[in-house]
Image (spheres, rainbow, N blue to C red):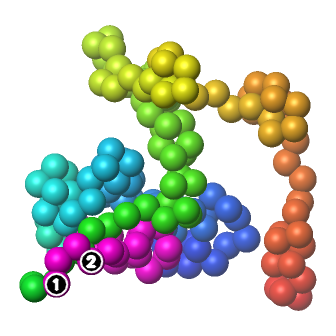
Amino acid sequence: MKWQDVGEMPCSVARSLSILGDRWTLLILRNAFLAVRRFDDFQSQLGVTRHILAERLSRLVETGVLKKVAYQDNPPRYEYRLTEMGRDLYPVLLALTTWGDKWLDEGKGVPLEYVHKSCGHKFRPTMVCSECRAPVTPHDVQPVAGPGLAAASAAQK
């Protein structure tokens, strides 16, 4: 299977990776959540080439993760803002951060801590069941085929 075909698989992880599956895209999103909006700011903070950055931003706009918003007319200049689809990636980035903090801090401590504005406490994200609110681990989950997998199987016949 070719990389460009991954997004066609009946698998949510594969489809997500077809949009997010490279280092620059996740770093762009991290910075977008840290209120970076402008091309030059992304470029200077990340050190990515202008060509790669333009390509990744275009892809994120094309897929609906970001939207371009004009902030200047002459010459035309745009900001990149998270859409609802993009904002829904926040738990994903927090989960990656939590994993990196636990396993990759080299004993130096976490680079950023997160404070919940409502209660004022530092927190670590946890995965809980949306129905009973109990913590969820891999041992607590049983995957079952959903309608998308059945549709994909029927389409292959």
Quadrant assignment for the C terminus: bottom right
Apparent side of residue 124 relative to residue 112 in the rendered image (left or right): right
16 and 45: which is toward the camera = 45
> Pointer 1: what residue?
73
- The Cα atoms of the two marked residues, 1 and 2, are separated by 7 Å
> Pointer 2: what residue?
70
138 and 85: which is toward the camera = 85
Residue depicted at 43% across the width and 26% down the height: 114
Which residues are the magenta region? 52-73
Apparent side of residue 143 relative to residue 10 in the rendered image (left or right): right
Outermost residue toward the top? Answer: 107
Q: Is residue 102 magenta?
A: no
Q: Position of residue 40 (x, y in %)?
A: 13, 63
Q: Is residue 61 magenta?
A: yes
User: Where is 124 relative to 51, above or below?
Assistant: above
Dot 2: element: strand
